[in-house]
Image (cartoon, helix red, strand yellow):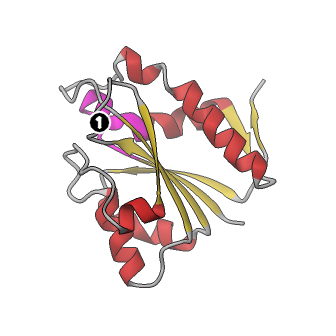
Amino acid sequence: MNVLIFGAGNLLLSDEGFGVHAIRYLADNYRFDDTVELYDGGTLGFMASHKLEEAQRVFMIDVVTTPGEPGQLHRFEKDDFILRRIPIKMSPHQLGIQEMLLLSEIRGRCPEKVTLFGVVPGSLAAGVELTQPLAARLPELAGLLQRELQAAGIRMERRP
């Protein structure tokens, strides 16, 4: 199974860069089977849709506007995107993940299993560091991904 872990965000706007920080955290702290690709999607939006369409299983990481405290993690599945049950994201991305998934679905190229781990941002002010509540969620997010991958028989192990 070809698995894509896709992190979106703008590293220049503090918590907006959560998805990219998450990809870096995973790359620095974990080893994966060759079937797993970590991808820094930055603010590419549709420009990165080919990565999504090449995968069989996708995990996306980004900020979302939804009720909750900064750092609160939410999980959304493909149907939440397609049926528009996901909140509109608070992001200066040119176009968001939701639009990218809908376009891939219309083109008949969207993978069957797509999960978004969305986190409530605390700050979108200029800055290259995550706020403390979001930085504290990186290990929790890694644990969630590790359980998902291991359940599918895919190796994700902590680096020594």
In this view, 1 is above or below 63: below
Q: Residue at x 34, y 22 (%)?
A: 129
Give the crowd class for mark 1: few <14, some 14-19, many >=20 residues within 10 Å: many
53 or 69: which is nearer to us?
Answer: 69
**Can you name the residue that lies furthest to the top here?**
132
Residue 79: x and y, percent?
A: 44, 65
Q: Residue at x 54, y 71 (%)?
A: 111
Q: Position of residue 116 (x, y in %)?
A: 46, 50
- Nearest to the observer: residue 62 or residue 43: 62
In the drawing, does residue 139 fall left or right of residue 88?
right
As displayed, is residue 17 above or below residue 123? below
Query: At 44% from the left edge and 21% from the top edge, which residue is drawn?
Result: 135
The residue tagged 1 is: 16
- Residue 25 lies, in percent from the top left, at 55, 31
Q: Amino acid at mark 1?
A: Glu
Highlighted magenta segment, given as a residue range? 8-19
Task: Provide the secondary structure element on which disc 1 rests.
Answer: helix
